[in-house]
Image (cartoon, rainbow, N blue to C red):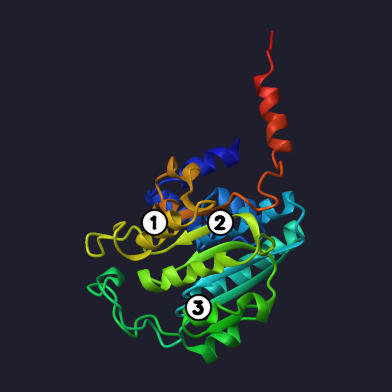
Amino acid sequence: MFLKILEKICDNKSLVAYLIKRILRNLFFLKTKTLVSLNAATRPHYAYCVYNAAILAKKLGYKSFSIIEFGVAGGNGIYFLEKFCEKVRLELNIEIQIYGFDLKEGLSNPKDYKDLPYWFQSGFYSMNETKLKKLLKHTKLILGDVRDTIKNFFHDYNPAPIGVILNDLDYYSSTKDSFNIFNGPGSRYLPRVFCYFDDIIGTENEMYNIYTGELLAIKEFNKKNEFKKITLNQNLVAKSNESWRYQIYYYHNFLHPNYNTFIGEDEQVNLNKELTLKK
C-alpha cells in the first residue's frame, strides 16, 4: 500500500515528487523494480526499457540479451546503462551486453531539410573517446558512420538477442540507416524490442513532426515492412506526467518464432482470481 501511495506521489511534476526521486535514486539498496515503478532512476526511460526487456527475456527463457545505444555522444547515457544493467543482472540473474554506436566527432552535415538543419549542425555532441573508455568496463563502442558500421555488426560481434534499442541519432538520415539493425534473422532479437527515441517531442523550437527527423524514419519503416512494425508504447500514454513516456516504442516482429509464445502465466492467474464470481 505504501509503495502504491509513493508511486502516485512520484508520478507527477511537483517539487515534492522531484525531491523524493532525488533521494530515492541514491538509495542503492532499492530494487530495480522499485526504481522503475517510482520513476526514480537517474534516466528513467533507460531504466524502464532495460528492466522490462529483462523480464520479457526471462519469461521467454533467454539467458542473455543485448542493448544498443545509437548516438553515444558524451557517454552519460551509456555509463548509466552499465551501472543499472549490473543491478539488473544481479537481481534477475540474466546477462546483458551493451553496444554503443557513434561517429565520435559529433554530428555530420545535415543532408537536407529532413535532418532539421535549423536545429542540428555538424560537430554537435562529440565524444571524448579516451575519457569515456576509461569509465566503461563492459560496453563495446562501435565508432564510425552507422550506415557502414551496422553492416557487419552481427558477424563481427555475435551479440546476444537484442532486447533494447535507444536511438539518439537526431537526423532522419542516420535514424533510417540505423533501422538496418532489424534486417537480421529472428534469432538476433527478442520478439518484441523496447525502443526509445530521443528527438520526437522537443519544444516550439524543434517542431518535430512526422515529415522530418526520427518520426519520418519510423513512418517510412512501418510503410515498408508488412510484418515488422515500430509502434508507440500505448500502456505508458495514460501515465502522461513524464514526457519520456511518449518516447518509448515497441518493435514487433510478427513472424518471430517466439512471437506467439505465451508469457502471461502469473498475470493471468491473478486476473482470473479477480474475475471469479464472489457469491
Image coords of residue 224 (percent x, y)? 45, 58
Say if 268 sits above or below 24 in the image: above
Say if 2 sits above or below 40 in the image: above
- Please name the residue shown 65% across and 64% down the image: 185
The residue wearing badge 2 is 194
How packed mark 3 is, by other alpha carbons closer than 10 Å (few <14, some 14-19, many 20 or more), is many
The residue wearing badge 3 is 75
User: SS for tag 2?
Assistant: strand
* Res 152 → quadrant: bottom right
Q: Amino acid at mark 1?
A: Lys
- Please name the residue shown 56% across and 64% down the image: 182
Q: CA distance from mark 1 to mark 2?
A: 17 Å
Image coords of residue 220 (percent x, y)? 39, 59
Q: CA distance from mark 2 to mark 3?
A: 20 Å
Which label's residue is closer to the chain start, 3 or 1? 3
Q: Is residue 230 left or right of residue 114?
A: right
- Please name the residue shown 41% across and 64% down the image: 198
The residue wearing badge 1 is 219
User: SS for tag 3?
Assistant: loop
Q: Amino acid at mark 2?
A: Phe
Screen quadrant of the C terminus: top right
Q: Is residue 169 left or right of residue 39?
A: left
* Res 278 → quadrant: top right
Q: Which one is closest to the eye, mark 2 or mark 3?
A: 2
How packed mark 2 is, by other alpha carbons closer than 10 Å (few <14, some 14-19, many 20 or more), is many
The residue sitting at the bottom extreme is: 130
Q: CA distance from mark 3 to mark 1?
A: 28 Å
Image coords of residue 42 (percent x, y)? 51, 63
